[in-house]
Image (cartoon, helix red, strand yellow):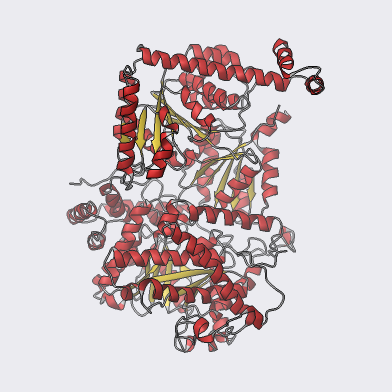
Amino acid sequence: MSEQKIKVIITMVGLDGHTTGAEVISRVLRDAGMEVVYLGVNQTPGMIVNAAIQEDVDIIGISAHASNYSLIEDVISLLRGSGVHDVPIVVGGNVPRHTITDLKAKGIAEVFAPGATGDEIINYIRANARAQNERAA
Amino acid sequence: MNALPDPGEITNALSSDSFRACAQLITAIERATPGLTPVLQVLYRGGRGNRIIGITGPPGAGKSSLVNQLITHIRRLGKTVAILAIDPSSPFSGGAVLGDRLRMMQHSADTGVFIRSMASRGQLGGLTKAVGDALIVLDAMPWDYIIVETVGVGQNELDIMQLADTVVLVQTPMSGDDVQAAKAGINEIGDIYVVNKCDHNEADRTVRFLQSMITLGLHLQPEKIWTQPVVKTQSVSGLGIEDLANHIDHFFSVMKPDTPDMRLRRRHRIAYQTKGILRDILERRFHDSNDQQIENSIDAILTRQSDPYALVSELLAAQG
Amino acid sequence: MKRQTDYGYEIKNVYTPADIPNFSYEQDLGDPGVFPYTRGYYPQGYRSRMWTQRMTAGLGTSHEANQVLKKYRDMGQTGGMCVISDRVFSSCIDPDHPLGEKEAGILGWPGSSLLEFEELMEDIPLTGQSITLLGSCAPSPLRLAYVVALAGKRGIDISQVHGSVMESPFENYFGQTDVSPFDQNLKLFLDACEYVLRNKIRMRACIISQHFQESGGNNAQAIAIEMSMLKEICGRLVNERGLDFDDVSNLPYELVSVGTRFFEEVAKIRALRRMWARLVREEFKSDKCHLLITVHTSGRTMTYQQPLNNIARCAIQTLAGVVSGCSALDNATFDNAHSEPSNLAARMSLNTQHIVAYESGAADVVDPLAGSYFVESLTNKIEEEAYKIYNEIQSQGGMIAALKKGYIQEMLSNEASKRFREIDAKERLVVGVNHLIIPPEEDFQIPIKEVHANDSRAIAERMAAWKQTRDQGALTAAIRTLYGGAKKDDRFNLMPSIIDAVSVYATVGEVIGVIRKARGISYDPFNIIECPFELV
């Protein structure tokens, strides 16, 4: 049987309008054979969680350009509150170091700071997205 | 993804935690998870016959924005809608950026709307079967409308429209040359024509062209009970959307399930859907067969001791 | 490692007279202050007028931003102030909107009403310095209305105020998305531009390549885009609004992103002046081509790893900006990849400018690199590349037509991906990122400017309460007049009714919401709240 495609949401949260990072990473993941549901700008935590459920994605990627990190925490709590526990959330962007620690403590699986390579991100997703865990199990 | 629900419990699952259950079933369909067939059988037999609207047209015609406006309108009337948005995949990597949802984002927080994107390639059972099966799932839920949106390029995507009750063909205003090209093209499949971006200079000319084509069609098939309307819209502002929605509703009031036209359509759809399933089963049998065995048969064909027809007979005779 | 300009021209190891054949001093350069202005607009260079050294402010409440502005003045920034808006104001919603209450004041100034502007400018003069208010395109008419209204209240002659408050609608496509439709943004932008020109207000309009480049575009694309935007906007003001080009020419203000490849950046700005001068002559039959060029040292080049390295980058970029003869300069700070500027980082950046201004000697002489075989060759090269792209855009019908076809977006998106891959593949070396990397634990920890979501709630609550205290009668009347005007033809200028509405404290959400409604779309761009006014 051919390999299952990993399905990823790439989104921004709140009013953040810096789309470049999200667009670049969407292409990188597409070229690595993944299905990317690109939500774009102006997404509320509720919209992101609904999309994650309806699209039944394997991992959620939030691109944050000096963003409001409390909105990212809202995504975590809403998603888990909806009973989705096996879909990891990762963040990419210029996140201060101490915020990385905070976000990880609150349930963000990984944070990719500027300078992370495409391969690092692809390999992380391949190893940690939901579908992969299932196959291993 | 959770394990597949038991066929006996599926109807329950779809009514209680409906969005998740529905989404997970569609994933199982895309991934051709074994054991799905009995679930789909139960769902099909409990199907509601919801109104399925196909929306297609060339890239850049503004289909997703139009769908977005249509959702707004449907929701304003207090009705519910599910959308299946088929997006092209990259032919190189097999990956895809599914961006249609982006243009429908304002409905993401609405519980009366379900939006699912599907890549047009890489469905293990072929796109037709995947979309057909996803529609079985959606039809088992109480949606007032189901919308299937595809890019009208490639036969695959156009074929999908056979799964819909009514087809909305979205065009942008065309230049004279485009009009000539379109005459030979895909225009035959529409039940409702939309000229989007109607503020454009060429809009009226395009409308006139479509109308003349319809009149011509009427002479050829005078017994038809439905005459295709041409609707002008502007998906950015929502202009013309109400008109479009009214035409869609009018279609269903003219083409009632018991009319011969509609009955014929639904029979075609079943035949089409069946072909998709059949093709899937046969192709899968080819892929699932013992590779060595097929290779041996191919060796025999190469030396003309056998032939492709004989191999097909072998495969058809195989168990399963 | 590639030895190429960012637009792919292979750099040779040495340049000689053979690299600038047919070089003509008069035609290609001219003296400073002489057509085609390659060497700059001012014969005396910085001896006649120093560049405006400025830092961007705006975080937290208006009161806090006011304190920062005063501090910058104490630090020697007196030529002009620059305030960037928060995302709430830029999205044309109010802080008490459900999407506003978590982001008001987080990344900029929460300027949703004249009240906020009055607080921002408390004890700060409106004249004698340039007033620059940045944000997105959509609220441009509000920013202009604030300045006009406050000048009125202070009894100041508006012609004495100068600065820049309008932004072009193009940047929405360059990774600075706001939520308003392009056509509406374009209309309101043209309204604001027409208003300042007809009323002799010395306000410039940002028609800038910075966002394009910061989002991944290359140098040649950036100046091609800049030419195309200038042509489109100036052309519309002349043809649609009936203005004289010689007046229109005073309007554009260009913010150029300057990176670390020193000579290429200098060549870019020299080529930009020359191309614009020639374009103005050909297209508009005029010699008035003094483009106000502000340099923004590139935020994109500020690395997350080893942030102190950014001080060195910023110094090189600042020097490039000065050598190229810019009129104003603002710096990305060394903590740019981590947070909003800390006080330390802001001071470092401003000091970098002061060191270049007073210690380096670079400000003593005009266009010091003129005549360098390398720099002249690079100036020709980038111009050649830019013309190719510019001509392609023109053949598609100009900037707006090319945007509607998706040509510009695709060019930018491809280039951004290419840049990412080049760094990924180490074809472009970035010290501390893909070259000479140190373990994170050895990295110097810089102080981080904190932003707190609690402040947003306070700003939102104050806005909600304060809205009730306004003169509702006057407000409703002004809003209804605005609504009536907004239903008219696009060439009917809404600026006077926007100023009237703002003067009675209509907020950005209300003003833009009502205009949206008049144009047949929802009051709230996010479809969450309803229009609070009864409109007739």
Q: From the image, which quarter does the N terminus of chain C lie in?
A: bottom right
Q: Viewer-proximal residue, B238 or B141?
A: B238
Residue sitting at x 55%, y 25%: B128
Coordinates of residue B19 in the picture (x, y in percent): 49, 27
Residue sitting at x 69%, y 67%: C3
Placement of C384 over or under B22, stated as above or below: below
Placement of A127 over or under B25, stated as above or below: below
Total number of numbered labels? 0
Q: Residue C71: tell me if it is visible.
A: no
Coordinates of residue C72 in the picture (x, y in percent): 46, 74
Q: Viewer-proximal residue, B177 or C99?
A: B177
Left or right of C91, for residue C522: left
Q: Viewer-proximal residue, C186 or C31?
A: C31
Quarter assignment of residue B218? top left
Coordinates of residue C110 in the picture (x, y in percent): 39, 59
Q: Residue C483: tell me if it is visible.
A: yes
Left or right of C380, for residue B197: left
Left or right of C100, for residue A91: right
Placement of C303 over or under C282, stated as above or below: above
Quarter assignment of residue C216? bottom right
Residue sitting at x 44%, y 77%: C73
Placement of B131 over or under C167, stated as above or below: above
